[in-house]
Image (spheres, rainbow, N blue to C red):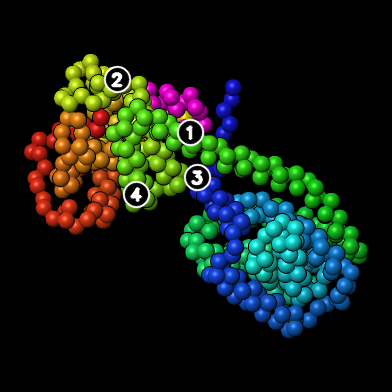
Amino acid sequence: MSVPTRDIDAATERRIEQMRERRRRKQGRRESIAMVAFSAAFLAAALTLAVVAEPVRSLSPELALAFVAALALAAGIEFSVGAATAVPTQLVFVPMLLLLPAPYVPLLVAAAFALRSAWGVLRQGADPGRALNGVADAWFSVAPAVVIVAAGAQVPGWEHLPVYAVAFGAQLLVDDLIYVARVGVALRVPPREAAADLGLAERVDLLLTPLGLLAALAAVDAPAGALLVVTLFPLLVGFEREREGRIERSLELGRAYRGTALLLRDLLEEDDEYTGHHTEDVVALSVRVAEQMGVDEDTLRATEMGALLHDIGKIAVPDKIINKAGPLDDAEWKIMKNHTVEGERMLQRVGGLLSSVGVVVRASHERWDGGGYPDGLAGDQIPLASRIVSACDAFNAMTTDRPYRKALPLTVAIAELRTHAGTQFAPDVVEALIAVVERDAPEWQLAFTEPAPAMPAPIRTT
C-alpha cells in the first residue's frame, strides 16, 4: 500500500493554518485600523487619478457593471499560497484596464473586491469587519492604470506592448510592497516571511496576463466580447478545488502524524515514567535551541518530532537494562544501542512524515567525531535535527537524577558541554544550547561554578 505524501512544507503549512484561523475569528483592532488606513490611502490615490487624468473614451455603465461582476467572480477563485491567496483576476483586470476608461478602473476594481467581500459576509459567514478589506485589496490596480494613462496608451494596440510590460512590472512591484506592508503592520508578519507567499501569486499573474491582453486586443471593436474569458472560470474552479483538496489532505496528514507521535510518546511514558518525562523536557529544550540557531521550519519540525520520539525504541529494551543502577555490560550495551534502530523501524512502519523523523531518531546518538552509533556518522553527515536532539538529550540527562547517579549542578553540566564540543557534540549546537540555558536559567543556578572533569568521557544519555 502506498503512503500518502504531504504537498506543503512546514512553513507554508503554518501560514495556511494561521490564515484560516484569522478568517474564522473576528478581526482584531490592530488589523482593523490597518485595513482602514490602507483602504483610505487607496481611495485617495484612485480618486485623484479619476479626477486628474483625462479618459479617452466614455464610460458605459452596463459594460462597467459586467466587468465588475466578472472580476468579483474571479476574485472568488482562491488558491492558497500561505498567508495569502492567488486569484486569477488578471483575466478580467487586463481587459478592464484597456477597454474601460483607464482612470476609473481602480475604483471599479475596488467595487468588485468590495462586492466579493460582501458576499463572503452575507453567504459564507465571514466577519463583517473584514468587508472593508476588499477595498485595500485593489491597490494592485493603481500603478498599471497610472502607467497606461501617463504613456498615452489607453487605446488598445500592439504598438503599446512595451508600455503594457512596464505596467505589469509596476503592478507586481507595488502589489508586493503593499502586501508586505499590510501584513507587517496589521499582523506583524516579518517582510521575509511575507515575501515567501508571493511567488505563486506572481506566477499566476504572469501566466494569465497574456490571455487577458489577447482578449482585450481581440475585443477592441466589441469590448463585451472580452468577457468570454469567464468561460475559463469553471476550469479554474476545478483546479482550485483539486489544489485545496490536496492542501487539506496534507494538513490532515500533519495532524494525524503529530497525533500518532503523541500517542507513541504516551505509550513510552506508560512503559517507563522517567523516560516519558525526560522526553517532554528534551522536546522543549530542543525546540528552543533550534529557534536560537534560526533553523528553517522543516528542520524545526524535524527537531521537535525527533526529540519527541528519540527514545521510542526503548519500548523494546527490557526495563532491567534501562533502570540498571550500575554500568551496563557489553551485552546490555548492545541491546541498548539498538534502540535507535528499533525506533527508526517503528516509525518507518507508520510512514510519511514519521518515516523521515525516523532518520533523526536513528542518528540521535551519533557523535560529531564519528564515534557514536549505530552508523558512525560524523560532522555534517549527522542530520542537524539529530545533532540538536543529541546535545539536549545529554544535557537533560546530566541535570536530572538517573538510576546510576544524581543530577549534576547546572554549571557543571554547562562545563561538560563545552568540554565535549567538537568531539561528542556539534560546536554550533553547544553554543546555542548554552545560550538558551544561560538565558532561561534562574541566576541562582549559575551563581557557583565547578570545574569540568579533567578527562573528557562520553556523556551517558540512556
- Dot 2 alpha-carbon crowd within 10 angstroms: few under 14, some 14 to 19, many 20 or more: few
Q: Please state which amino acid type lies under the numbered disc 2.
A: Pro
Nearer-the-camera pick, 155 or 397: 397
Q: Which residues are magenta?
A: 342-354
Between disc 3 and disc 1, whose residue precedes? 3
Quarter where residue 274 is shown: top left
Q: Position of residue 317 (x, y in %)?
A: 31, 21
Left or right? Give the position of 349 relative to 322.
right
Q: Residue 260: which numbered mark, if any?
A: 1
- Dot 1 alpha-carbon crowd within 10 angstroms: few under 14, some 14 to 19, many 20 or more: some
- Dot 3 alpha-carbon crowd within 10 angstroms: few under 14, some 14 to 19, many 20 or more: some
Could you say whether the residue bearing mark 3 is in a helix, strand or loop?
helix
Left or right? Give the position of 61 relative to 399.
right
Query: What residue does disc 4 label?
Result: 288
Between disc 2 and disc 3, whose residue precedes? 3
Query: What residue does disc 3 label?
Result: 10
Q: Please state which amino acid type lies under the numbered disc 1.
A: Thr
Q: In the rendered image, is residue 385 in sight?
A: no
Between disc 1 and disc 4, whose residue precedes? 1
Between disc 2 and disc 4, whose residue precedes? 4
